[in-house]
Each structure stands twice: as C-alpha cells, then as structure tokens.
Amino acid sequence: MASHGVLILECLDESDPGSEGHFISHMLSLMRVPHQYIEVRTKRQLIQLLQSSPYRIVHITTHGTTKKLGRKENFQGLWTQEGTLKKADLKGLQGHLKGYTVVCTACLSASPQFRRGFVEVTECSHYIAPKGSPYFYDAVFFAHIFYHKHLILKRSVRKSFQEYRKRYKNPHGFVLRPLTTRSKVTRRKLRASQR
C-alpha cells in the first residue's frame, strides 16, 4: 500500500495563468505533508504514473477536453500535450488505484460517465472532481481546504469533503464519488465478461 502523502500530476498548457500543481506542492510543503510533483506531457506517461503512485492520494491537475453538443459541453477526457486520456484508455489502470483517493481538478471531470468508469476500473476508494469549470484559484482554494481537513486535522476523506461542501456551499461544483457496493458488483460483472 502507498504511504501517507500526495502525488501531484500536472499537465501544463502555455496559456495557463500559473501552475496549480506547483502552488499545491508549495502549500503541502508548508503543511509538512510528504508529496511529489511531476509534470506530465503524454497520456501514456499519465497512465504509467497512475499505475505506480507512491502516495495514497493522487492529485491530477490538467484541463478537461470537451466537445460542444449544441449549447452543452460534453466531457471527453483528461488533456495532455500529446493526446486526451479518455474513458476507453482506462483499461490499463484496472485495479491499480485500489484504496487510493484521486482528486482531479480538470473542468467537467465529474461527468457521470467518466467518473463512474474511472472508479469502477481503477477501484479507487474516492474520486473527487468538479461538475463545472473552476477557475485556477477556485481549484487551489478547494485543495487547500480539503487537504487541511484531511491531512492535518486527520478527518476522513468523506468528512473532509462534506465539511467543505457544507461550510463553503461548494461553489465550484466538486463531487465525491466513493467506491460503492454497486460499483463493486458492476466491476465483478465486467471482469466476468472479460474472461
């Protein structure tokens, strides 16, 4: 099992107003929380790093790739400089994040199809992501509050997230998707069908 701490995986774009990952890394340093920051360039590299996190929390900071469908934006996947990590690409992560918490600040990355697929394939305990499109500073604000409650005050992931939602009214639309019994059943059916 991975140790206490946070692995920060960041995909930077030239147009980014700053580095969310560096900001979070600095914040965790001030909190004296073990962590590692890695700048990711390709979806292959992102998958490899997700398969081998040394820490029980993985924080993905990137953009959400979207496609316009009329007036609505449809989430396609996690952006990297050399391609988008889509739901279909998650097969390589089968069971690799069992017991982990994944925090993703990519716009719209809490879209039901993607988050359900991510949790079921990776078997992560918790997946936290925004339904909307948080600004850089909103994503950092969420991370600061959540990590302080969870890593410093030693509250559970669920309690830390609930306190954030209740106290700050969750203005950024973050969603917590835990691994549920239903997800476990669906995962068993998926494995059985692959045999």
Image (spheres, rainbow, N blue to C red):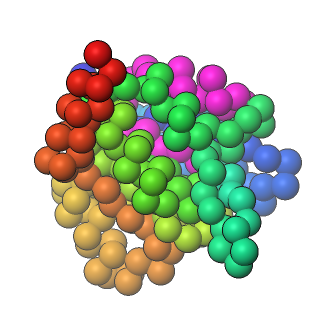
Location of residue 149 with respect to 168 vertically, above or below: above
| Residue 44 colored in magenta in the image | yes
Quadrant of residue 72 in the image? Answer: bottom right
> Which residue is depicted at the point 71% across and 59% down?
67
Where is residue 16? Give x, y as percent.
Answer: 78, 55
Where is 172 relative to 48, above or below? below
The residue at the point 48 percent across, 44 percent down is 59
Q: Is residue 54 above or below residue 115?
A: above
Q: Nearer the viewer, residue 22 or 73?
A: 73
Residue 81 percent coordinates (x, y):
77, 36
Q: Indicate the quadrant where residue 88 lies.
A: top right
**Which residue is the extreme one toward the top?**
195
Q: Is residue 100 left or right of residue 104?
A: left
Would residue 116 be seen by someone viewing this image from the given angle?
yes
Counting from the top left corner in percent of width and height, residue 103 is at 43, 50
| Quadrant holding the N terminus | top left
- The residue positioned farthest toward the left in the image shown: 181
Q: Of 102 and 145, which appears nearest the observer? A: 102
Image quadrant in which the C terminus is located:
top left
* Residue 75 is inside the magenta segment: no
Image coordinates of residue 60 in percent, x first then y, are 53, 44
Q: In this figure, what is the number of numbered marks?
A: 0
Q: Residue at x 32, y 40 (%)?
A: 120
**117 and 62: which is toward the camera:** 117
Q: Residue at x 34, y 43 (%)?
A: 119
- Magenta residues, start to end: 40-61
Using the image as rendered, state which of residue 133 and residue 145 is in the foreground.
133
- Residue 143 seen in this snapshot: no
